[in-house]
Amino acid sequence: KNEVEQSPQNLTAQEGEFITINCSYSVGISALHWLQQHPGGGIVSLFMLSSGKKKHGRLIATINIQEKHSSLHITASHPRDSAVYICAVLGGSNYKLTFGKGTLLTVNP
Amino acid sequence: ETGVTQTPRHLVMGMTNKKSLKCEQHLGHNAMYWYKQSAKKPLELMFVYSLEERVENNSVPSRFSPECPNSSHLFLHLHTLQPEDSALYLCASSQGYWTGGLSYEQYFGPGTRLTVT
């Protein structure tokens, strides 16, 4: 069982919809990353957070350390948001970076 | 445009070939990483270099051999690979390496799509 679980695995939305992607983890962590991977492979780091909430444009990331849960929200979704969103946590007994399997988001016009 | 470049972008090699993947970062970072991404599996961290010293080797077979000649360049030398090694190989860099609870934002290259025949 992966230490980092993302849901849903696949998400299809209509342009303009509010999107939420969830990440749950089972180990104590020092930081959590949200990454975006577009078709073709390129990965972009969206957020790195260890508490609270961060906002960048239409993207919002929140984390609840007690519940071991993070969410990535996209407001007013757009087809260019279509990508795989990956959650990764730094922590655990051997202090390593562990990745979720990703959530494939498709936003239709 | 992330400041991290990788060459080649695509590579097809036979199981008896020897090839190398190259990564270069123009961000002045001190840590560099090799990741493997196979279909339907999470990203797997392979190697980490911090200040040109290998600090992590996550049980990677010896047919993969990393080299970090300086803080801007990272290589992955490949020899006698297996078909199951076919994957996207991603390089990344960060300002520092995660120690003492610090985590750094990672900047990824575009990846090399490797096919082993």
Image: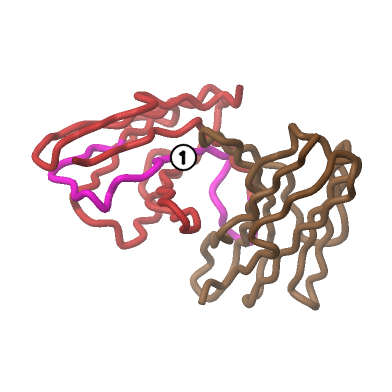
User: Can you give x and y, in whole percent of width and height, for residue B1 in the image?
Assistant: 61, 22
Residue drawn where x is 75% and y is 38% of the image: A81
- Compare residues B53 and B113 and report the one nearer the observer: B113
> In what element is the residue under mark 1?
strand
Q: Amino acid at mark 1?
A: Met
Q: Quadrant of residue A106?
A: top right
Specify whether residue B80 is painted magenta.
yes
* Side (left or right) of B15 relative to B103: left
Q: Which quadrant is the C terminus of chain A positioned in?
A: top right
User: Can you give x and y, in whole percent of width and height, for residue B14 in the image?
Assistant: 14, 37
Which chain is represented by red in the image? B
Residue drawn where x is 84% and y is 46% of the image: A74
* Side (left or right) of B47 relative to A107: left
Residue drawn where x is 59% and y is 42% of the image: B106
Provide the residue span drawn in magenta. Answer: B76-103
> Where B48 sits versus A90, above or below?
above
> Where B115 sits versus A89, above or below?
above
* Chain containing the residue with disc 1: B
Q: Which residue is mark 1?
A: B32
Residue drawn where x is 28% and y is 38% of the image: B115
- Compare residues A55 and A90 and report the one nearer the observer: A55
Specify whether residue B41 is painted magenta.
no
* Side (left or right) of B87 relative to A8: left
User: Can you give x and y, in whole percent of width and height, for residue B100 in the image?
Assistant: 60, 60
Few, some or many residues within 10 Å of mark 1 (<14, 14–19, 20+):
many
Which chain is represented by brown in the image? A
